[in-house]
Each structure stands twice: as structure tokens, then as C-alpha cells.
Image (spheres, rainbow, N blue to C red):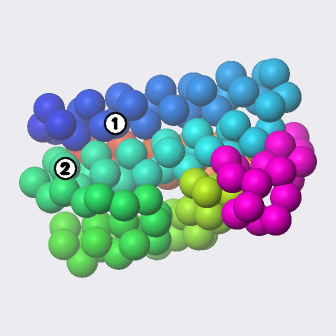
Amino acid sequence: MNKDAGLWLRQAERDLIKAENDLKTGDWDSPAFWSQQCAEKGQKALLLNAGKAYRGHELLELARVIKEEIGVDVSPIEEDLRELTIHYVISRYPNAANAVPYELYDEKKARELVERARRVLEWARRNLR
């Protein structure tokens, strides 16, 4: 794994830890954001390892680039990416979903999103080896 990819993977791992920590405090909107960030950075690590750079936050678009440009099968995580991608905005901005973010999330949803991020991160690790 090249240096840049390693840095992005380490940050993805740290973002997952942040999401897990926020589960302990009951801040349900925060795990949603950190889960999306974990998935995004895990995917970007794969691209950087292949010498590709990508700017943007839309997880399904990142997956399309990964599939087309480096030939990695993204089908195992597509459903996770579909669910996680919207939380980049919705988890932070009251006008994104016409509601205050902290009122949109509950423990069940936050835990689900953290589990989805964990699956994406494990997929990224497997494909970096």
C-alpha cells in the first residue's frame, strides 16, 4: 500500500472510532456523519493506492470510479454506500431534510450506519492487500 493510501485508510479507521465513541454519548447525528466519512475515506484510499485521485463526497459515484478505473467489485457494499451517502449533508444541516439533524436520528439508526461503515472499511482493507 502506498503512503497516501495508508494515510487515508488510517483516517477512515479513526472516523469509525469517532462514530463508535458518539454512540456511547447518545449523540445520534454524529455517528451518521462519521460513518459516511469513514466510507468515503476508505474508498479514496483504494483510489489513491491505484494512483487515482477523486474529489467529491458521493459514495456511489466513488464506487463507480473504483469499479471502472481499477476494476474492484463494489457490489458487496453498494447497498451500504447507498444508505450512507446522504448522511454527509443530512446529519449536519437543518435545511437538508427540513428538520434539525439531532432530531432525525435515533440509536437504532446510528448503530445501523456505524455497522454499514464498518463493512465498507473492511471491504476497503481487503481490497488494499
In percent of the image, x 81 and y 22: which residue is there?
25
> In the image, is 32 to the left or to the right of 128?
right
Task: Give the SS element for disc 1.
Answer: helix
Residue 37 or residue 70, whichever sits in front: 37
> Residue 58 at x, y = what percent?
46, 65
Contact check, label 1 and label 2, Cβ < 8 Å:
no
Magenta span includes 127: no
Q: In which quarter of the image is the N terminus?
A: top left
- Image point 36% across, 53% down: which residue? 43
Q: Is residue 123 visible in the rendered structure shown here?
A: no
How packed mark 1 is, by other alpha carbons closer than 10 Å (few <14, some 14-19, many 20 or more), is many
Q: Name the residue under label 1.
A: 9
Q: What stretch is highlighted in magenta?
A: 91-109
Measured Cα–Cα span from mark 1 to mark 2: 10 Å
| Above or below: residue 81 compared with residue 123 | below
Q: What residue type is labelled 2?
A: Leu
Q: Residue furthest front?
A: 95
Q: Position of residue 94 (x, y in %)?
A: 76, 54
* Residue 28 horizontal/vertical position (percent): 80, 38
Residue at 19% x, 49% y: name it. 48
Quadrant assignment, res 52: bottom left
Apparent side of residue 81 relative to residue 62 in the rendered image (left or right): right
Q: Amino acid type of disc 1?
A: Leu
Q: Is the magenta stretch mostly helix, strand or loop?
A: loop
Q: Position of residue 77 (x, y in %)?
A: 51, 63
Residue 48: image tag: 2
N-terminal label among 1 and 2: 1
Residue 31 visible in the displayed image: yes
The residue drawn where x is 67% and y is 47% is: 92
Residue 108 drawn in magenta = yes
